[in-house]
Image (tube, rainbow, N blue to C red):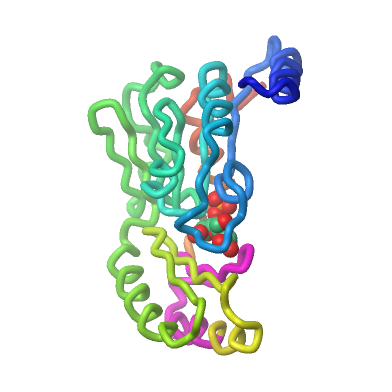
């Protein structure tokens, strides 16, 4: 962290953190990277990457994004950070340095629908696994339906889908919205949400970024949940 104001902010943060247990949760788009027209070009600056790397050396640090987890990792490229993609429906927790105490899967989250695997030194938690085939099908239908709307873009975020309209002409927006709605009209197992110039389709499960945050705190141990 070379920038003087960033340095003093960091020192201030460290002072405030003294004696407390701190966990850092970050969003990706619009937080670690600037909002840009092309979602595939939302790159993170080297200075931001260095700052996150440094923060993660002191505190357990997680990035919880609406995007596909692999895509976020591709942008961030930092190990020792926890990643949750698809609005928290795809979580990877590396065992250690902060998770040394977690040696087995947590039964609290072992429901019939949630897939929780422990593989070598990572734990994977995916509460919407069963929706994957239907999501892949919806992506294909959406791509076909929206291909004639100039500027529309379908982003497959694995356990959810984003339909971007940042580059769509204002007069085409209603048509696009209708098309998106029509795809899930007879599918109560999916719901529509909205973000910044984006319409999203997600499984109708009771799981969001907040649940992902609780899950990660839970994995970090009771000391992080009750203080
Ligand atoms: O939870 P987030 O990490 O904030 O993800 C939310 C959406 O972020 C991305 O879209 C947003 O950023 C794009 C790049 O700057 C921008 O073009 C778009 O208009 C924004 O909505 C991402 O592409 C989406 O899939 C996420 O759902």
Q: Say which quadrant the C terminus sits in.
A: top right
Residue 113 location, x and y as percent?
35, 54
For the residue pair 4 and 35, the one nearer the viewer reads as 4
Residue 38 seen in this snapshot: yes
Relative to 191, say whether 27 is above or below: above
Visible residue check, residue 222: no
Question: In the rendered image of this protein, does residue 104 appear above or below residue 133?
Answer: above
Q: Name the foreground residue: 155 vs 191.
A: 155
What residue appears at the point 31 percent right and 69 percent down from the top-left corner? 136
Q: Where is residue 217 drawn, in percent x and y? A: 53, 31
* Ligand 1 location (quadrant): bottom right
The magenta span reads 178-202
Q: Looking at the picture, does residue 172 appear above or below residue 130?
A: below
- Name which residue lies at 59% across and 87% down: 172
In the rendered image, the quadrant that contains the N terminus is top right
Q: Residue at x 45, y 33 (%)?
A: 82
**Residue occupying the far top of the picture:** 19
Is 171 left, or right, of 202 in this rendering? right
Q: Nearer the viewer, residue 45 or 126?
A: 45
Q: Does the magenta-highlighted stretch encompass residue 25?
A: no
Identify which residue, 3 or 179, lies in the foreground.
Answer: 3
Is 181 magenta? The answer is yes
Identity of the residue furthest to the left in this view:
120
Q: Is residue 116 above or below residue 218?
A: below
The quadrant where residue 105 appears? top left
User: Could you tell me residue 7's position as x and y percent?
Assistant: 70, 19
Quadrant position of residue 135: bottom left
Relative image position of residue 140 (x, y in whole percent): 32, 76
């Amino acid at each position: 962290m070379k920038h003087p104001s960033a340095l003093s902010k960091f020192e201030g943060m460290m002072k405030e953190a003294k004696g407390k247990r701190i966990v850092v949760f970050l969003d990706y788009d619009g937080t670690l990277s600037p909002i840009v027209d092309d979602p595939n070009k939302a790159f993170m600056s080297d200075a931001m990457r260095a700052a996150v790397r440094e923060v993660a050396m002191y505190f357990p640090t997680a990035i919880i994004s609406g995007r596909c987890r692999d895509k976020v990792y591709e942008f961030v490229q930092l190990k020792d950070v926890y990643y949750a993609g698809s609005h928290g429906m795809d979580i990877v927790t590396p065992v250690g340095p902060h998770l040394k105490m977690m040696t087995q899967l947590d039964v609290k989250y072992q429901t019939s629908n949630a897939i929780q695997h422990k593989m070598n030194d990572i734990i994977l938690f995916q509460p919407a696994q069963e929706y994957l085939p239907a999501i892949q099908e919806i992506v294909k239908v959406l791509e076909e339906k929206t291909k004639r709307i100039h500027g529309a873009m379908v982003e497959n975020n694995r356990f959810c889908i984003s339909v971007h309209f940042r580059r769509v002409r204002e007069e085409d927006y209603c048509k696009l919205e209708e098309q998106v709605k029509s795809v899930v009209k007879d599918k109560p197992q999916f719901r529509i949400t909205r973000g910044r110039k984006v319409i999203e389709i997600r499984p109708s499960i009771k799981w969001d970024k907040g649940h992902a945050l609780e899950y990660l705190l839970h994995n970090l141990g009771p000391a992080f949940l009750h203080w």
